[in-house]
Every structure is written in structure tokens, then in C-alpha cells.
Amino acid sequence: MMFRILPDNLKFDGFTLVTGFHGIGVTGYWSIKYMIQNLKARRIGIIDTDKVSPVSSTANKSIVTPFELYRKDNLIFFKTEIQPIQGYEIYFYRELCDWIIKSKFKEVVLIGGLDLSLQNDKSMYRLVHTSAYKPKKNLKDALILESDRLIVGPVALMLNYFEAMFFPSYAILPYASAERVDPRAAATSVDIISNHYSLNINVESLIKGAEDLESQIAQNQNIKPHKRSESFYT
């Protein structure tokens, strides 16, 4: 498999990588995209691989490639516009993990989503981390994902690999709708990461989008909107 970072002279020693993917509520993807836009992070690199679909798009009069790296201070955001070719996901994410470890990143933050129907308390998210990572700051008291729950997709692949390699990584998993895009779940993860790394990201537009969407759904179903807690923390 061909996997390389362009340009090839980038250095990441001591940086933190933050990434998320298209999953439940599209939580990971929208969280990464929102942070990149609000922080005005600069695109610094592109991942070139032969396991990607022939798809391209544009934004702000520029070409958007499937896999891109953005930088804001000592944070690197990895944004995935589309998934690798079906059947090659494991190979792609293992190569990604190998590159992360070899590049000497400090740690990796993963963002996913948990089915909202599994929520059984007022906590808005669960935390999962590898043995090599010790939760700190606002994550010290976070509730860990229950032992009977499963994580699937790229987040699971990367957590498994980092655990095997004793590499520090953790996943923020907000509860999210399994039926639609969930801006409120994205707001939860963005707010947690913003506080953890002192980024000062305003999530009001995400909350407003969530309220509008929930109100529209409630009107279509002729029921009152379900009011969820405004607190993002356990």
C-alpha cells in the first residue's frame, strides 16, 4: 500500500493529533471541520494513498482533497472528507497509526459518537483511553465507557493499534443520534477539547443548529422537542 505525507519534510515531534470520522451523528467529522474553521487552522499537508476513491471537491475556491492535515499552534487536525476504499480501511488506518508513532506525536485525540439510545444518565459523553494515556485536567473525572459497550469503525481500529503499541491516545465519545447529523454531539466534543487545550472555541452556532434541527423534527412528528441538558460535562 502506498501511504505518504506531502510535503515530505514536515516535522511533528511533540505535537498532538486530533481526528474524527464519519460515524454516529457524523460527530467526528463535523467536530474536526468546525474546529479547523473556527481556529482558522492552516492546511500544511495532504495524505497521498492509492486506497482512496477518485473524488474531489472545492471550498473557498480551493481544491479539497480526501485526507488533509491542518495546524494550529501545537495541534494537528487530520480531516477525512471520505473513507478509504471499502475493504482497505484496516490497511489505511494501520498505516496512519504507524506514521503517527514514527513521527513522534505526543498523543492522539479521537472523536466518535455513541448511540443516544444508550444514554442512561446526565453525562453527555464517555471517555476511552489506552493504557499509555493518563487522563488529566477536565478529563480526570470523565466517566469511562461501560464494559458492555462496543466501539466500531476507525476509532476502534486506531485505539486497538495504539493499545498494542503502548501509545498515548484517548477517545471522546458524545452521545449522538444514530439517525441524523447531530450538531449537539459535535458541540459536546468541541467544548471538551477546547477546554482541555485552552482553545476558547465558541460552540453557540452548533447549539443553535441543533435546536433548530430538533425543533423541525419535533414539528414534523407533531411532538414537543426533547430537551437535553445544556451541560457538556459529567
Image (tube, grey):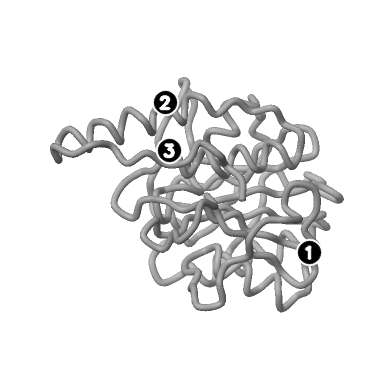
Q: Amino acid at mark 3?
A: Pro
Name the foreground residue: 9 vs 75: 75
Residue 142 at x, y percent in the picture: 67, 56
The quadrant in which the N terminus is found is bottom right
Q: Residue at x 61, y 45 (%)?
A: 233
Between marks 2 and 1, how big is the CA–CA gap? Answer: 34 Å
Residue at left offset 40%, top offset 35%: 57
Say what secondary structure mark 3 lies in: helix
Say few, some or many: other residues with alpha carbon within 10 Å of mark 3 (under 14 / 14 to 19 / 20 or more): many
Q: Hey, which quadrant is residue 170 in on the image? A: bottom right
Sequence order check: which comes first, mark 2 or mark 1? 1
Residue indicated by mark 1? 133
Q: Amino acid at mark 2?
A: Lys
Rendered location of residue 89, percent (x, y): 48, 67
Q: Residues within 10 Å of mark 2 (few under 14, many from 20)?
A: few
Q: CA distance from mark 2 to mark 3?
A: 9 Å
Question: Residue type at mark 1?
Answer: Tyr
Can you tell which mark lies on residue 208? 2
Q: Earlier in the sequence, mark 3 or mark 1?
A: 1
Q: Earlier in the sequence, mark 2 or mark 3?
A: 3
| Residue extending farthest right | 14
**Residue 222 against residue 111 in the figure, above or below:** above
Determine the secondary structure under disc 2: helix
Residue highlighted by disc 3: 183
